[in-house]
Image (cartoon, rainbow, N blue to C red):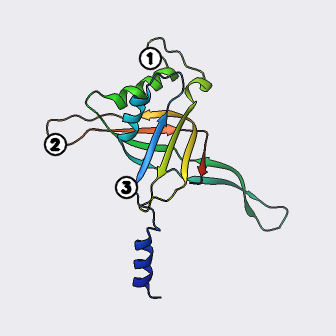
Amino acid sequence: MDIAAHLATVFSSGEYLRPNKYEATITPPPSVTATSEFLRRVSVNCRSAVLPGRAIETKEHGQGGFVVRKMAHSQQYTDLSLTFYLSEDLLEKRLFDAWQDSMFDPVYQNVGYYKDYAAGVVTVKPLSRAGRAMPTYKFYECWPLSVNDVQVAYDLDNQVAGLDVTFAYHHWELEEG
């Protein structure tokens, strides 16, 4: 089979992941008050998601004059990045600001308990063109590490403001669809 025939077969069957077809859901911890409608609106406004990678940390190991080998000793996850369209009522920013306020009280400067603010779950589910079940990425013990600035300017006419949020998390699991 030549390359053109192969590509035609693959594209027609929908075997490649389409990065513009996904669904993201945010479930904050119980310490952050949000209705299901509120969370649905935030999830619908997720403009992009960057599925994080994983790196294996190594140490060199050798004995005497023998060959030195790299050996795995731990793993490290990169942070989860989501970008949201920002609605006029700043719903998305208010959610993540409230979540960060549960972590660190901006008035009294008190730090919250990890178990209270890191009980969130973020789910990113790629969607297939053919309607088949797809693997779902679930991120556990999530919390918003960074809620970035929102730019407003007179020359940004006809644009929708965006909000970048970076999440820390304990681990992720891939659930088969």
Instruction: Identify the residue under disc 1.
Output: 106
Instruction: Identify the residue under disc 3.
Output: 20
Question: Residue at 18% across / 35% down in the picture?
Answer: 153
Marks 3 and 2 sit apart, C-alpha to C-alpha, by 22 Å
Mark 3, secondary structure of its residue: loop
Q: What's the amino acid at mark 3?
A: Asn
Q: What's the amino acid at mark 2?
A: Asn
Name the quadrant of the C terminus: bottom right
Q: Relative to residue 159, is residue 107 drawn left or right? A: right
Residue at the right extreme, as displayed: 64
Mark 2, secondary structure of its residue: loop
| Residue 69 placement (x, y as % from top left) | 74, 64
The tally of labels here is 3
Asked if the residue at tag 2 contacts the one at tag 1, i.e. Cβ–Cβ closer than 8 Å, the answer is no
Marks 3 and 1 sit apart, C-alpha to C-alpha, by 37 Å
Q: Specify few, some or many for label 2: CA neighbours under 10 Å numbering under 14, 14-19, or 20 or more.
A: few
First in sequence: mark 3 vs mark 2 = 3
Q: Nearer the viewer, residue 154 or 127?
A: 127
| Residue 87 placement (x, y as % from top left) | 28, 33
First in sequence: mark 1 vs mark 2 = 1
Instruction: Identify the residue under disc 2.
Output: 158
Comparing marks 1 and 2, which lies closer to the viewer?
A: 2
Q: Nearer the viewer, residue 3 or 77?
A: 3
Question: Residue at 49% across / 59% down in the picture?
Answer: 132
| Residue 83 placement (x, y as % from top left) | 37, 42
Q: What's the amino acid at mark 1?
A: Pro
Q: Is residue 168 above or below residue 74?
A: above
